[in-house]
Image (spheres, grey):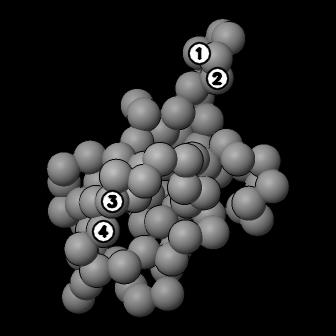
Amino acid sequence: MPTVTVDGEPRGFRPGQTVAAVLLAAGRTSWRTTRTGRRPRGVFCGIGVCHDCLVTVNGLPDVRACLREAADGDAIGTAS
């Protein structure tokens, strides 16, 4: 089974899953907060329009988790 690391913790996933699907399967429904109010954010639209699902993948910031297919060995970082 391929694996990624999410904030340093290994997580298995099925080929074809998006980074958002990996996070949701791990029980992570939010991983960012709003600038004002500090309200939780995660996947909202699921199609890459709202940009609420931004994460860092392999050091590249602002990757839309709902559009990026997870790849074996990816290092995924979240803001919260």
Amino acid type, mark 1: Arg
Callout 1: SS: loop
Q: For the point 42% across and 53% down, which residue is it?
A: 60
Query: How far apart are labels 2 and 3 at the CA level?
Result: 23 Å
Q: Quadrant of residue 75?
A: bottom left
Callout 3: SS: loop
Rendering coords of residue 76 (x, y %): 35, 55
Residue 58 numbered mark, or none: 3
Callout 4: SS: loop
Rendering coords of residue 35 (x, y %): 64, 17
Give the residue number, with chain letter if any, for mark 2. 34
Residue 52 numbered mark, or none: none
Pointer 2: residues within 10 angstroms few (<14), some, or many (20+)? few
Query: How far apart are labels 2 and 1 at the CA level?
Result: 5 Å
Give the residue number, with chain letter if any, for mark 4. 74
Give the residue number, with chain letter if any, for mark 1. 38
Q: For the point 23% across and 88% down, which residue is it?
A: 1
Query: How far apart are labels 4 and 3 at the CA level?
Result: 6 Å
Query: How far apart are labels 2 and 4 at the CA level?
Result: 26 Å
Whether label 4 touches label 3, CB < 8 Å: yes
Rendering coords of residue 67 (x, y %): 63, 69
Mark before the other along the chain sequence, 1 or 3: 1
Pointer 4: residues within 10 angstroms few (<14), some, or many (20+)? some
Amino acid type, mark 4: Asp
Mark before the other along the chain sequence, 2 or 4: 2
Q: Mark 1 or mark 4: which is in front?
A: 4
